[in-house]
Amino acid sequence: MARILIVDDSPIDQQLTGSLLRKHLQADVTFAKDGVEALEQVNLHAPELVLTDMQMPRMDGLKLVATLKEKHPMIPVVLMTAAGSEEIAVKALSIGAASYVSKRSLAADLCDTVANVLEISNEHRTQYRVLQRQLRWESEFVVENDMKLVMGLAGHLMQGMRGMGICDSAEEVRVGVALAEALLNAYYHGNLDVPSSLREESLDEFYELAKKRSEQSPYRERRIRVSARYSRGHAVFSISDDGKGFDTSKLPDPTDPTAMTKPHGRGLLLMRSFMDEVRFNKAGNTVTMVKSKTQEAS
């Protein structure tokens, strides 16, 4: 039996939606008259889904969605829209609401909409619980010189951090930035052999040369190889390219404040700032980064 919280300042609409959900979904339904009372109910009863009106006193549906997204991200929110609330509903969808149903078609659409969202949410919650019990996992990738794939891979790699409890969402973003910088270095300076000095001289020429080489041999045949190893204590990422490498002894000092004013060395500065350990192989075409579990994520 699903626990559903209905948030609406209209007693008539409360009873209508409640009776529909009880009859067709056998739901355990509770009520709140606005967003403030809804948050109290969420803390008391931990509903599996929140069904909310948009226009209410004290705290409207938009603010409720934003607050639930921040404090209870695993609870999906379905909007009930009435005439005049469409604009605010669109905003609510953009910041985290899972779906919506028009009050004019509650009888036809409400139960199917709620049932679909519950099914998806329960599957997501189950997968999250599975990840919380995973002790370790490894993955390997071979990526061609495609910018969309490179950036997509950075996003994929950082998703494992929170699932394994290594860092919170804020730190996860910083790890993602470090991963993106390492991948971009492998892409531009490794496989495409575009010098960072050119970036200082002309950004247009830098990107033009990169695009040209990505379509030419031998550059287009080169690949980026990535391995990721996650455990409950830390994550280890290794990123290699097929370029000629570089002399790692000539790397700029990332702790030098003047490094922040120069385009070259920026990636290394961010990588060393956000990761606990950064090291290169002798050839200079493989970087290994380690991120250990943060205290906030414990």
Image: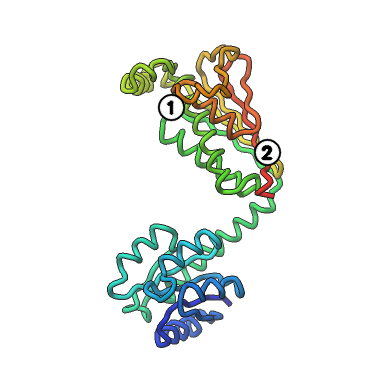
Q: Which is nearer the N-term, disc 2 or disc 1? A: 1
Q: How many marks?
A: 2
Q: Residues within 10 Å of mark 1 (few under 14, many from 20)?
A: many
Residue at the extreme front? 257
Helix, strand or loop for disc 2: strand
Helix, strand or loop for disc 1: loop
Residue at the extreme left? 84
- The residue pinned by badge 2 equals 292
Measured as percent of width and height from the top left, residue 283 is found at: 59, 14
Q: Residues within 10 Å of mark 2 (few under 14, many from 20)?
A: some
In this view of the protein, which residue sits in the foreground, 246 or 296?
A: 296
Where 121 sits versus 218, above or below? below
Where 225 sits versus 88, above or below? above
Residue 132 shown left or right of residue 28 in the figure: right
Q: Residue at x 42, y 15 (%)?
A: 197
Tag 2–tag 1 contact (CB < 8 Å): no
Q: Which mark is residue 89?
A: none
Quarter occupied by residue 124: bottom right
Measured as percent of width and height from the top left, residue 139 is found at: 60, 37
- Amino acid under disc 1: Asn
Measured as percent of width and height from the top left, residue 150 is found at: 46, 33
Measured as percent of width and height from the top left, residue 29 is found at: 53, 81
- The residue pinned by badge 1 equals 145
In this view of the protein, which residue sits in the foreground, 54 or 154?
A: 54
